Image (cartoon, grey):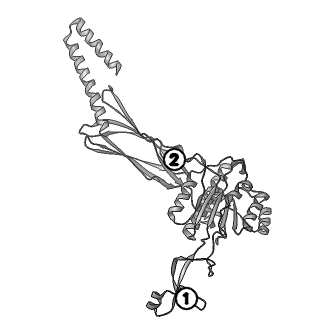
Amino acid sequence: MFNIFWALLVLFAIAALFRMDWVYYLAYVVGGIWLFSHWWVRRSLSHVEIQRELNLFAFAGETVDGKVQLNNLSWLPLPWLHIQETVPFDLLDQQNYRSVVSVPGKAQTVYPYTLRCSKRGYYPIGPLRLNTGDLFGFVDAGWQETRPVHLTVYPRVFALEKLGLPSRSPFGSQASRQRLYEDPTRLAGVRDYTPGDSLRNIHWKATAREDVLQVKKFQPAIALNVTVVLDLNKNAYPISGAVGSSEWAVTVAASVASHIVTIQRQQVGLITNGLDPLAGRIANPIPARNGRGHLMSILGLLARIQMHEVEPTLADWLPPQLANLDWGSTLVVVTPNVDERALWTLHNAYRRGSNIVALVCAPDPNFKQMQAQGERLGVQLYRSVWEKDLHEMAAQG
């Protein structure tokens, strides 16, 4: 801008010194174009409505379509507009995310792009940047998004059989005909009367309707649930392959939680010593609930959770986390290995009435020995098929 300003002063000085009318005319024309360009470009850009359309949730392995929609609310066109979207490396699906378009007056322009969700994570998309100018290069104007949006990429979810686990999973409580505890305020239906039923539980309206004595059925007062424990202590993983093993552990935890909610229709919670970057600290436990909304909350945490170097081992960290565990619930521990101290810690939880399952998700030379010892201590140990083995299984058919 200052170069044009000084150029105009030089032209006026030359015109005044040599009394050249055409130089005056040239200065007026250039100055007028310069002023008009400033007014045109800035006004036009301020009347552009910018909207990004992007699905902010996806699973690893999926492709997400996004677009930037520009609505020019002014009659003045923008001769050219440079669009640049900021995309993390792990989401790249094309060579670049920038384009130069022309936006006519009272018109709409769309810039489409795709994102490839190669791995789980919590990714910033943006800030979006726009730059424009006039045809003569006199003026430049720009706009930048104040803050990025975030795309949550959930971890992959597999059927348990594909993880090398039993098809009839030992997770969760199994249906039982005997209800030890019933809540009289939670009606679950009616059934035929059988000798021994309390007369206080007779459902008189249903009896009159069916013409057969009916008694009330109640939901259990204590709902047995599953708690998934995900060990992301960096010190517990082998130095070689720590990233791959920890990522596979997250996948296993997500698959177990999904199986409990969607297949077994039971409650599931999550406890982990991993770092939640959104909170800037170790993730808070998620209490056991059921329903798809609750499952997506768990998967959302598993999308962004990170391996973290913590001082206490699993044997020292786990007992305080289990202080409020309900009697009869199932504890599924996803960990890179189980040593003897951890095994005795899990045995203590078993003695307090919990069903204990440990899923080992990293190479462990002592697995067979720990598995045999675990059988004697009431702890079921399984080795999950690692991702590279899963790919080989898929390639074989």
Spot occupied by residue 15 in the image (x, y as percentages of width and height): 23, 10
**Mark 2 element type:** strand
- Give the camera-side residue of 54 and 96: 54
Can residue 361 be seen from the camera position used here? no
Reading the image, the residue beneath label 1 is: 199
Spot occupied by residue 249 in the image (x, y as percentages of width and height): 65, 56
Q: Quadrant of the C terminus?
A: bottom right
Q: Amino acid at mark 1?
A: Leu
- Give the camera-side residue of 283 and 393: 283
Spot occupied by residue 255 in the image (x, y as percentages of width and height): 59, 62
Reading the image, the residue beneath label 2 is: 123
Callout 1 environment at 10 Å: few (<14), some (14 to 19), or many (20+)? Answer: few
- Give the camera-side residue of 35 and 323: 323
In the rendered view, does 297 fall on the left or right side of 321? Answer: left
- Give the camera-side residue of 214 and 41: 214
**Mark 1 element type:** helix
Residue farthest toward the left in the current orientation of the protein: 21
User: Residue at the location (70% across, 66% down)?
Assistant: 356
